[in-house]
Amino acid sequence: MTNSRDQLSLFSVSEQKTLAYGSKQPDLLKISSDALQDWKQRLFQYQQQIHVAPTLQQGALFDLTSSIGSASGDIDVASIDPFSLPQQNTEFWRWKASDAGVAALYFVIDYELPILLYVGETVKSGQRWKGEHDCKRYLLNYRQVHYQNQLDTLLGIAFWSLAPTQARDRQRLETALIQRWRSPFNKENWEFWGTPFTGLVVG
């Protein structure tokens, strides 16, 4: 039986040498159409196992993440479905808003397949992405590589507005969701996916 680390490896050994995360080389984001689609399909297949049949996942993964206690009570991590939340444009932060928003978990998704790319948390959902944010750079790279290979994307963001108001509780929930979905743009999962999109913005 293949172990979990083998199942989660996106690239072959030779590909990982070329696409190792953290590299600043210009060739980092020159990914072929076949390699890119294979990357996405493996991620899609892994996340679909969770989306379609969450109760069949290995117990070891969920011993620490199945339920998160907070001041507002226990939150069942499996009950949060990022793909069922209302979709918003990733440029939402540019729009004028009447307030700063609420405490929330947010999910960056490519709805074309679909695949969950990033999980984050914020105390003010309307302001989280103003200014610098690493995930914005990853998305620019991701979008550009698709453009170079003439492949479609449908990037969006979704907010779960029932998140705990206490930062520590919210961060624990964020961590549990990152572990659960193995979102590749979260640094906690780079060792599994070897994502190449964290380098410099493609010019």
Image: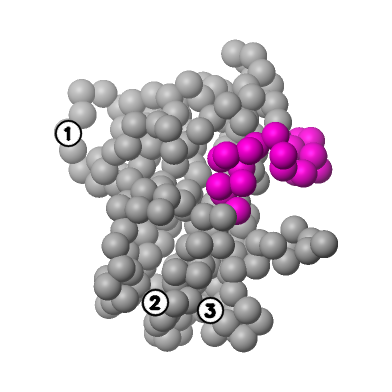
The three-letter amino acid code for the residue at tag 3 is: Leu
Occupied quadrant, residue 33? bottom left
Q: Residue shown at 38%/37% (left/top)?
A: 158
Of labels 3 and 1, the one closer to you: 3
The three-letter amino acid code for the residue at tag 1 is: Lys
Magenta part of the protein: which range? Answer: 46-65
To which residue does mark 1 refer? 96
To which residue does mark 2 refer? 33
The first of marks 2 and 1 along the sequence is 2
Of labels 2 and 1, the one closer to you: 2
Q: Is residue 10 positioned above or below 127 on the image?
A: below
The first of marks 3 and 2 along the sequence is 3
To which residue does mark 3 refer? 19
Q: Residue shown at 60%/53% (left/top)?
A: 46
Q: Nearer the viewer, residue 43 or 138?
A: 43
Q: Nearer the viewer, residue 5 or 18?
A: 5
